[in-house]
Image: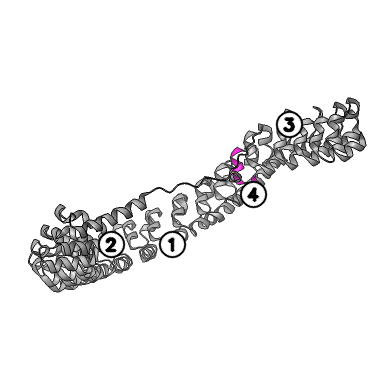
Amino acid sequence: VLTAVTQDWRALRAASADMRQDVTVAMAAVKQNGAALAFAGPHARSDRAVVLEAIKQDPQALAHAADTLRDDETVVRAAVAQDWTALAHASPRMKESHAVMTEVVRQAWEQLALASDSVKNNEEVVLVAVQASWRALMHAGEVPRGSRTVMLAAVSQDWEALQYATAGMRADRQVVLTALAKDWRALMYTSGSLLSDRNVVMAAVNQDWKALGYASIELQGDKAVIMAAVSKRGTALIHATKELQADREIVLKAVSTDGTALRYAVKELHADMDLVLTAVKSHGAALIHADPSLRENKEVVLAAVRSDGLALQHAAECLRDDKDVVMAAVESQGGGLRYASEGMQSDREVVLVAVANHAMALKYISQDLHQDRALVVAAVRSSGQALEYASEEMRNDRAIVSEAIANDGMSLRYAAARFHADKALVMAAAKQNPHVIRFATEELKQDPDVAALISDHQCFRAAADTPQTPKTPKHEDIVTSSFRV
């Protein structure tokens, strides 16, 4: 029998009951295939050496071991060290074993979620799981979540792990600084005591000014901290104390990085000309926060509209009628013409500059200039869509409509109704944008040439809308393995 089994382990199945009990015969079989343990007799399946050899060949052979060996830590650990799913064949007591569960979570950290409280509170087991993935921390007990060693392993991977730490660890400087090195947002999970620690808060603020919002009141009143924050982003001034919002040096640094930070400075500084000039040069819209006396100061307003032409809306009325100021605004942003005085909206020189920069500024010009053909042509050459704001007379001018269509076929929609039946214009527009066909008259849509364009467009749309047949996955691409202990 031994000779037969040595040649082919399957011979053990046909052996007599006595031979299947024989340890030597069983050993010869399992050395070839661990599954042979299923055919061994009770005596052989109770032999540790035989079972360990079987497990060495196939960890799932644990299922055929005697009950005493499925409750043996050395045996079970040997099995799960190769394949954690062998734990399914172990005794309930082994699922409480820290040594066994360490091998399990080393391979599958998620199994910590199904472990006993004793295992979840074992620092060594949880550390192994966390080293595999910080997310294992969410399944850990209170004890390991209060361990510096475990928490450092977790936050070294991802700052978000800090949220699962105990209050003590969220107040641990080393743990928090390690988390902050990954991302400043770890500050939101940091305990109150460290929110007053300048080095901790600065580590976050140096990454992103928004971290200042989590700092203690004491640090929001610390000039060095606030200076570091506003150097990153001026609007961080919102988190500063009133005393520092009144500090000219701080505010000047803030508005130099973001002019709109002026809104968070104390009112007295809104009248500081040098400071306001710095703000509007950085961001023209900051003019809205300037003291009224400075919004009628030509030097300040010129600086603002040169930065952003739309800042003209915040200028004093007298300066919205000042040609130098309005010209500077429309040179920066043609749409600024909207906020100019009626007199400036009638100034051809100003309007030409505005329309050249932003064709849609045609909407804001005076009625008189709406009849200025050269001006309208300049606008539609820049953007055909400007035809929407041309006068009825201009939209009824074939040459102007042709110029608009040459720039943007869809501008046909704003042309006089008679041009929707003009085959040449419709064809020119449709070749540029087939969607414009819907604006053609029903009669023109029956024209053979136009109908052909519509047909081609519909074929294109149909091809684009046809869903692609999904590729049938190959059998080998389908993975259906799952196992839970």
Q: Are marks 3 and 2 in contact (CB under 8 Å)?
A: no
Does residue 33 appear to the left or right of 250 in the view shown?
right
For the residues labelled 1 and 2, the Cα–Cα distance comes to: 20 Å
Residue 400 can be seen, yes or no? yes
Q: What residue does disc 4 label?
A: 153
Does residue 377 appear to the left or right of 304 in the view shown?
left
Of the numbered discs 1 and 4, the one sitting upstream in the chain is 4
In the rendered image, residue 347 lying in the magenta stretch gets the answer no
- Give 399 or 68, whichever is nearer the viewer: 399
Give the foreground label among 1 and 4. Answer: 4
Q: Position of residue 7 (x, y in %)?
A: 88, 40
Q: Position of residue 307 (x, y in %)?
A: 29, 68
Give the foreground label among 4 and 3. Answer: 3
Q: Position of residue 328 (x, y in %)?
A: 22, 72
Helix, strand or loop at label 3? It is: helix
Q: Please rate how many residues cluster around mark 2, counting C-alpha atoms within 10 Å: few if below 14, some from 14 to 19, many from 20.
A: many
Residue 291 can be seen, yes or no? no
For the residues labelled 4 and 2, the Cα–Cα distance comes to: 48 Å
Q: What residue does disc 2 label?
A: 285
In the rendered image, residue 136 lying in the magenta stretch gets the answer yes
Q: Are marks 4 and 2 in contact (CB under 8 Å)?
A: no
Q: Please rate how many residues cluster around mark 3, counting C-alpha atoms within 10 Å: few if below 14, some from 14 to 19, many from 20.
A: many
For the residues labelled 4 and 3, the Cα–Cα distance comes to: 32 Å
Helix, strand or loop at label 1? It is: helix
